[in-house]
Image (spheres, helix red, strand yellow):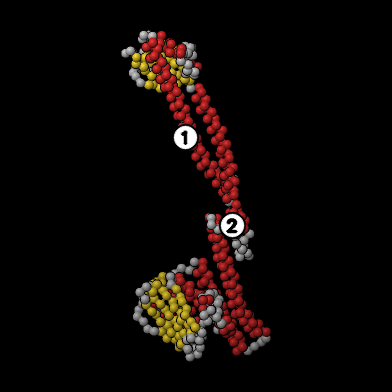
Amino acid sequence: MFSTVRVRLTLWYVLVFGLVLAAFSTFVYGVLSQSLYTRLDQSLLRATQVVAGEFRSEIAEHQGNATVGAAQTLNELHLPGTNVAIFDGEQLLAANFERDQLSARELLPTPTSGTGTILHTIQGRDNERSRVAVVSVQEADKNYLIAAAEPLQNLLEQLESIRRIFYFGFPASLLIAGIGGFVLARKSLASVVAMSHQAELISERNLHERLSIENTGDELGHLARVFNELLSRLDGSFESMREFIADASHELRTPLSIIRGEADVVLSQERDSTEYKDALAIIQDEAKRLSRIVDDMMALARADAGRRRLQIGEFYLNDLVEECCKAATVLTVNGVSLTQKPTADIAFRGDEDLLRRMLMNLLDNAIKYTPSGGSVSVEIACEPTNVNIIVSDTGIGIPADQAPHVFERFYRVDKARSRAEGGSGLGLAIAKWVAEAHKGSIELVSSPGHGSKFTVSLPR
């Protein structure tokens, strides 16, 4: 039960609400308690002031007889619920309550000397507590004490009623808050639940489907948009994978069909050694082609999986280009010339084997698509931050609408001619990967009938 987000949100909501409610209830109870005690003290002080004024009048009326004045004062004043006693020092002069109800001496604080007003609480008989206000009255050079007391029973009962309300209201409030929080969390997460149900129905067969977005402005709408973008990328990856598998199957099927056909022909009947040699030569060429295709596919697969790490070393880039040009001269047939512009030594750090493979792929591509009598040139141009390797040819060129796709895997501008010449459509894809693996880039500038120019830019 506690594993669901709705329950956890509800518990957090109830916990926070409970803490806030407890703090608020404590604050309200403290304010009310202080207010009730303050009102009681003010009531007692007013009572003592009234008694003091009347006591002075009675003393003056009875020629200074304090005992008669005190008794007369309490007889004439009616203070319901308030117990009043008048003292001369510690001697009780008069009181308006029975002695068995409250001990008059308990009303006085200890010590009793001094002037001013004293507020204190006493514990009477039967454990009944009372609040007492004591004031001193100066009359005819004598100091009298007037004490007014009221039992705290009513005040304590009011506070008990307030506490009882809190005791019963606090759990009820938490229960209502919990139910409301659960309903609110359930309603808030309804969109997430709906999205999860939709996501469960999406597989590799229907990656084109997307999550519905009700409110694009909130966080859940943003989450749905991000998930839809993820589905779009996955759909594109699966589509690329399907195309890759289909293209790879097509590329592998052709040489395999040729090998099988040649084998079936030579095995169908007895033939002389020349025919066997011709058939084996064809099989050998197709096997080499298969080997190149498989090597290229393995290289790209390792690159995609991040398992092919660069073997960084120091070498001279101009020497590497020169070696690749010499190796590529064996590919120049039908009068295609290959030239390299000389350059000074260029120290470079990178993966020499991968860069060699990239250059050989570019040279092989340029030579294949350059007609008889054409030329291929290689140039190194140094910049402050980059080294540019430029491979140019005077070949058939590439149409503008197909130029952005030449670096895609198994893509051919002239499919029939490329297959006849042994191309697999992976060379330029590998060249692009090698350049990007070295934090560089490769660009193509081409026009039909005027040749192509590949520029590899590598950071120094």
- The percent position of residue 301, horizontal first and vertical second, equals 53, 70
Determine whether, in the image, residue 132 is placed left or right of residue 264: left
Above or below for 303 versus 417: above
- The percent position of residue 53, horizontal first and vertical second, equals 39, 17
Determine whether, in the image, residue 424 is placed left or right of residue 40: right
Q: Are marks 2 and 1 in contact (CB under 8 Å)?
A: no
Give the residue displayed 50% in from the left and 81% down from the top: 365
Give the position of the C terminus as an image quadrant: bottom left
Taking the view exactly as shown, the residue that stands out farthest to the front is 61
Amino acid carrying mark 1 in the image: Phe
Q: Which of these two is toward me, 253 or 304?
A: 304
Q: Which of these two is toward me, 41 or 213?
A: 41
- The percent position of residue 394, horizontal first and vertical second, equals 47, 86
Where, by quadrant of the figure, is residue 135 drawn?
Answer: top left
Residue of label 1: 27
Disc 2 on helix, strand or loop? loop
* Number of numbered markers: 2
Give the CA distance from mark 2 to mark 1.
Answer: 44 Å
Determine whether, in the image, residue 356 is placed left or right of residue 213: left
Above or below for 12 versus 279: above
Residue of label 2: 214
Give the residue displayed 59% in from the left and 42% down from the top: 179
Count neighbours of disc 1 (C-alpha within 10 A) and say few if under 14, some if 14 to 19, many if 20 or more: few
Above or below for 116 versus 291: above
Taking the view exactly as shown, the residue that stands out farthest to the right is 268
Disc 1 on helix, strand or loop? helix
Q: Is residue 127 visible?
A: no
Where, by quadrant of the figure, is residue 205 drawn?
Answer: bottom right
Give the residue displayed 60% in from the left and 73% down from the top: 246
